[in-house]
Amino acid sequence: MSNQTGISRIARLRRSARVRKKVIGTAEVPRLSVYRSLNHIYSQVIDDVSGKTLVSASSLKIELPPVEESSADDSEQKGKKGKKKAKPAGTKLRRSIAVGDLIARLAKEKGIEKVVFDRGGFLYHGRIAALADAARKGGLKF
């Protein structure tokens, strides 16, 4: 049984356990845990000492603003050399950025400014990196 990227579930769990050995959240510096499913992304700020989730956010209930359509002027510039039209971010990436902003805002409301990042065994690129960057822009330090 393998997921879309060809990595078996057991291999991902082993990698997750290897990461978790080194990343432990405390009351002063909790752990920002990220889980990425095929369509959604979830994040939690966890105090591992007490075993409590302090803050959580997911892309299940986030409303994204619509992407602006390209105008006729953009199609004219498409053919010029050196000018590349910027593609709008995909929906999954936009959801990740929105969850990163939301988790940072909720954590700041609870008085949490510094966290340790737990990528959950997922590679640090794409949606995971986008969530982390958005959380940093929102004021979390890690």
Image (cartoon, rainbow, N blue to C red):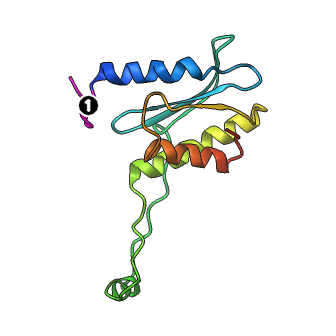
Q: What element carries label 1?
A: loop
Q: Which residue in the structure is indicated by mark 1?
A: 3
Question: In the drawing, does residue 100 fall left or right of residue 96?
Answer: right
Question: In the drawing, does residue 116 fall left or right of residue 65?
Answer: right
Query: Residue at the location (36% across, 85% down)?
Result: 72
- What is the residue that sits farthest to the top in this orientation? 50
What amino acid is labelled 1 in the image? Asn
Q: Mark 1, residues whose alpha carbon is within 10 Å: few (<14), some, or many (≥20)?
A: few
Query: Residue at the location (50% across, 45% down)?
Result: 129
Query: Residue at the location (49% across, 57% down)?
Result: 65
Residue 23 location in percent, x, y? 59, 23
Query: Residue at the location (67% across, 38% down)?
Result: 142
Q: Can residue 101 be seen in this view?
A: no
| 101 within the magenta span | no
| 2 within the magenta span | yes
The magenta span reads: 1-7
- What is the residue that sits farthest to the left in this orientation? 1
